[in-house]
Amino acid sequence: MMMNFFKILVFVGLFALISCKKASKDKDVKSIVAATSVEGATSKKVEVTSFFIDSTMVRKHLYTLASDDMQGRKSGTEGIEKAAKYIENEFQKIGLSTFDGLDSYRQTFNFTPRGSKEEITSSNIIGVLEGSSKKDEYIVISAHYDHLGMKKSGSGDLIYNGANDDASGVTGVLTLAEYFKKVGNERSIVFAAFTAEEMGLIGSTYFGKGIDASKFVAGINLEMIGKTPSSGPNTAWLTGFERSDFGKIVQKNLEGSGYQLFPDPYKKFNLFFRSDNASLARLGVPSHTFSTTAIDVDKDYHQVSDHAETLNMTVITQTIQAVAKGTKSIIDGIDTPTRVVIKETKN
């Protein structure tokens, strides 16, 4: 009987110890999550961003979207359809809602590419996280999921996998959707994977025609975020920096984080108007593109060599973390960027 009594005491003691550890762990996680909503809690914000955004999920999304199975993701092909289904499934797993007026994540439309007589049917893939206190104010987090497809003939590698351009950006959209689903958002966030960017910003232009731009506070576009920029590690650059104070808000939020954001150093390429941010910017929305790639010397841009293996998972992961931290005050309704100033320049 004494032995049984001793066993009971040991069991009770172990149970109490496990319960205490679990409670402590739960409390720590809750405090980390709560800290993301507290202005000035810099160290906690870095901690929660790293806690929810890691290279494991980044690698999964990137390698899937840039795989040979996606056949270069050209709009109107079987390959991009596979990519669309993957993004849809991820949106569903995360628990995103559908965009206003749509009965699925797909915004499907027909178009005829410039220089072609063949009509194409393709879809933007759009999911929404409704805001807590400012649900009628919207922020778009976007990237294009299309690329150039495949070479029609030849030998060797024939697939334009588009890992950096722009599977890396779509990876950011998916990862940020999961992140904000966990930490919360005061303003509503529209997560958009646009089609036919490579054919002339067609998907984002179609999206822009169907919205009330006055309700859209900002556009956060991700393009080619897979390589270390010329400004060095832990940095990115922003197109159209001078056209609104969006970039300055991000810089302020990144102070003390070890990550820096710079204005676009490649002005001669007119990049502000060459990615999907331009479709919203032309409507007055402060919409800008984050990038890390030295576009002037990148040997893989629009080449079949743009493979996932050429990218740096740490660069992508840290850039996504920086975007999350740098834009949080906008998403939480603390900061509102000035409307973008449009004055297009010619190449």
Image (cartoon, grey):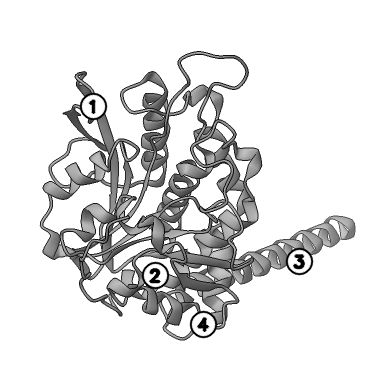
Task: Say what secondary structure mark 3 lies in.
Answer: helix
Amino acid type at mark 3: Gly
Front-most of 152 and 311? 152
Residue 121 position (above or below residue 343): above
**Answer yes or no: do the residues labelled 2 and 3 have beta carbons within 8 Å?**
no
Residue 203 position (above or below residue 327): above
Q: Provide the residue designation for mark 4.
A: 255
Q: CA distance from mark 1 to mark 2?
A: 39 Å
Q: Answer with the quarter of the image where residue 79 lies.
A: top left
Mark 4 or mark 3: whose residue is earlier in sequence: 3
Q: Can you say which quadrant of the picture contains the N terminus?
A: bottom right
Asked whether residue 332 is in view, the answer is: no
- Residue 269 image point, x, y percent: 40, 55
Q: Provide the residue designation for mark 1.
A: 115
Asked whether residue 17 is in view, the answer is: yes
Amino acid type at mark 2: Thr
The mark found on residue 338 in the picture is none
Q: Provide the residue designation for mark 3.
A: 13
Q: Provide the residue designation for mark 2.
A: 327
Which is closer to the viewer, label 2 or label 3?
A: 2
- Residue 139 image point, x, y percent: 27, 61
Residue lying at the far front in this picture: please name it.
Answer: 347
**Answer yes or no: do the residues labelled 4 and 2 have beta carbons within 8 Å?**
no
**Answer yes or no: do the residues labelled 1 and 2 have beta carbons within 8 Å?**
no
Front-most of 130 and 269? 269
Who's the residue at 49% across and 50% down the image?
224
Who's the residue at 36% across and 25% down the image?
81
Q: Label 4 neighbourhood size at 10 Å, few (<14), some (14-19), many (20+)?
A: few
Q: CA distance from mark 4 to mark 2?
A: 12 Å
Amino acid type at mark 1: Gly
Q: Label 1 neighbourhood size at 10 Å, few (<14), some (14-19), many (20+)?
A: few
